[in-house]
Image: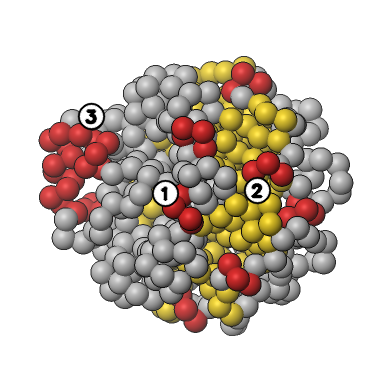
Amino acid sequence: MKGACGTPASVCERRSGRGGQAAARLYRGMLLFLLACPASGDKDPASDSRADSTPVTESATTPATRLLGSHALGEGLAMVHGSDTRAGAGKAAAACDLDGDGVGDLLVGAPENNAGQGLVMCFRGPVSGTLSSADAELLVQGTGTFDGMGTSISCLDDRDGDGGPDVMLGAPKYDEARGAAFLFNGSTLSRAPVLTLEDALGSVRGASPNDQMGIEAGLAGDVDGDGKTEVFVSAWLGDEGAKDSGSLFLYGQVVGVTSPLDALAGWTGIAEKDWAAYGVGAGQDVNADGYDDLLIGADGVDTPSEFAGAAYLLLGPFAGIRSLADADATLLGEYEDENGGHGVAMSPDLTGDGAPDLIIGGFGYQEWAGRVALFSGAPSGSRTFSEADVVVAPAAAGAFYGYSVAGPGDVDGDGIADLFISARYDPTAGENAGAAWLHYGPVDPVTVLESDTAVLLGENAGDEAGFIVMGLDDLNGDGLPELGVGAPGNAAGGELAGALYIWSAAP
């Protein structure tokens, strides 16, 4: 999927279908610093952790011990590495308290494990030190040769009435890449040693080969005002709007085998190869009307420039299947190959104005340095990233800053939500080593470039640390969210076995 060449799958391959000259320009510009494009199971979900943070107040104080400056990722709380060559561990992860002991439990995906079957590893919290599949309490395994199990992982609320959280796992290559998202009982995940897709409570399956349903899935909140939460599942190559335009569907209960025809509501991409809903932000009511809202990224959008990308704000309530052309706001990248909307997320207030914020990455901005646009509340109409409330662009050319974005909540305990951004190919620690930037809230263009930032650096050349960044439920018992950084190029467990690093911002 969206890989090292900067766009879905291989830029050289997929972009040649939309214009060989654009592909050639991109290839020449990146040849000096990119590794070979990774396999087509890559995943860059929006943040799976949407922990609430306390609104900004005058009494908020800066913790004396919070993380600042630059640090090697290996100095953190824990590292989980793959145990199979080319497993791609760390391309997805989530954390929630599955066993009810008050501490989060960790789920880590390795979607290319065992020649692409895929694997999800579950570790009971608290977690620390260096871990691998041999240390996991539970393994969930794909069953088909190229399922890609564990490409997306999301903790949900209680979907089956047993009182505990449940989990949705994406396998976008399942069944000729129709793809699927599988719902698992959370308490079962904390007990059984090995599960397969057949043990799921239910699933959402793609309609056609190569739709890749399950590329992203998660909790949407209450989007229709019925007092119950819904889940979303996306198919970034769905053809409902146009060929490979992408689509997202909303469901109440997932029982048995369901399809797009069973959806309560949904959204479809506008034009061919828009690749809508590869990234999805959810879990916030940005206009304070009592309905949760959605942010859908579409980094293949060619307006105003080729592959400028876009993100669409959709205000609840939702009903029926609609086109993203009807979105409440269209937020546009501006430059050729900016890939705006590849990474999107929603967050509690980051800027200090009391309203939730929209986070949109454009990793191709200015020779692939990248930037992130923050829009406060509920913008309307069509706006460009340059018209955002805050624009953050601290990285050097070739860093891919904004490849993955997250609103992890209040990670340092000062009562203000924070911002977590990846720079997948940052060269500071080595060619393509990667990095992740933690910007403490309230975020403004001055503080993010001066004192209120920590940078976590990949350990080795080629690690691609920052393929994904996320906030995670408390994994060490201090009551604060943790930070996760995926590094699928890491070789601690074998060539491209991959790794996930866990950090605390309040050591």
Q: Mark 2 points at which residue?
A: 196
Q: Mark 3 points at which residue?
A: 18
Front-most of residues 194 and 434: 194
Residue 239, image quadrant: top left
Q: Distance between the residues labelled 2 and 3?
A: 38 Å
The residue located at (68%, 41%) in the rendering is: 198
Query: Which quadrant of the figure contains the N terminus?
Result: top left
Q: Distance between the residues labelled 2 and 1?
A: 21 Å
Front-most of residues 400 and 195: 195
Residue 107, image quadrant: bottom right
| SS at circle 1 | loop
Q: Is residue 478 visible?
A: yes
Name the N-terminal-most of marks 1 and 3. Answer: 3
- Give the amino acid at mark 2: Thr
What's the coloring here?
secondary structure
Category of crowding for the residue at label 1, using alpha-carbon neighbours closer than 10 angstroms: few (below 14), some (14–19), many (at least 20)? many
Q: Where is residue 472 in the image (x, y as percent from the top left)?
A: 62, 61
